[in-house]
Amino acid sequence: MRSVFIRTLALVAVLVLPATAFAQFGHPFNSPYSGGWGKDNANRLLFDTTWDGNKVNGTVTSAGTKLNIVSSDFDYSNPEAWKVTMKLEGKDATGKPVTATVNGTLENVGVYYKIFRGTWTQGAEKHDFVVTRN
């Protein structure tokens, strides 16, 4: 009887502890990220994002142009590295529409220090990017 109780307690701990670790930091995109894209990450990127319980909201500033996140899609199949796609829209300094797509992998999901890296596509340009959680 006692061993059943201990096994049940151990099972509960195994199931609950990862959930409490995730709750400690909240959703990974409920935080700013900064970094860059292009050669030597020379084009600065700032992700100012929030998670509303269903999707990522916020803005991404790229080389001085602020873009709104219009959609985001997550593939949670690998709990340690999520696949993420975001569609962005905004206007450049002259008022011309700008669209961008972010396809990447969010690494270190279970810890505070997260890295989001992948491909930044803006118009005909396609570059690697990397940002880290601030």
Image (cartoon, rainbow, N blue to C red):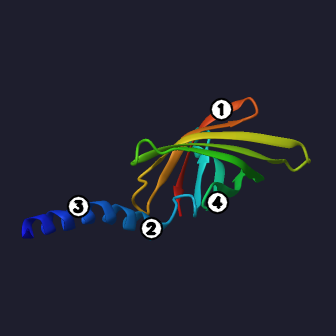
* Residue type marked 3: Leu
Q: Is residue 49 above or below residue 71?
A: below
Give the number of the disc on residue 23: 2
| Residue that lies at the very extreme toward the top in this rendered image | 124
| Residue that lies at the very extreme toward the front in this rendered image | 1
Report, in whole angstroms, how far the alpha carbon at label 4 lies from the one at label 3. Answer: 35 Å
In the picture of the structure, the residue carrying the numbered disc 1 is 126
Which sits earlier in the primary sequence, circle 3 or circle 2? 3
Task: Residue 65 in the image: state x and y as whole percent.
Answer: 78, 51
Give the number of the disc on residue 11: 3
As rendered, which of 95 and 20 lies closer to the eye? 20
Report, in whole angstroms, how far the alpha carbon at label 1 lies from the one at label 3. Answer: 47 Å
Task: Residue 115 in the image: state x and y as whole percent.
Answer: 48, 51
Q: Tell us which disc is closer to us: 2 or 4.
A: 2
Instruction: Give the quadrant of residue 10.
Output: bottom left
Q: Tell us which disc is closer to us: 1 or 3.
A: 3
Q: Quadrant of the N terminus?
A: bottom left
Q: Residues within 10 Å of mark 1 (few under 14, many from 20)?
A: some
Q: Tell us which disc is closer to us: 4 or 3.
A: 3
Q: Tell us which disc is closer to us: 1 or 2.
A: 2
As rendered, which of 99 and 94 lies closer to the eye? 99
* Residue type marked 1: Lys
Which sits earlier in the primary sequence, circle 1 or circle 4? 4
Report if residue 63 is visible in the image: no
Q: Residue at x 50, y 66 (%)?
A: 26
Which sits earlier in the primary sequence, circle 1 or circle 2? 2
Report, in whole angstroms, how far the alpha carbon at label 1 lies from the one at label 4. Answer: 22 Å
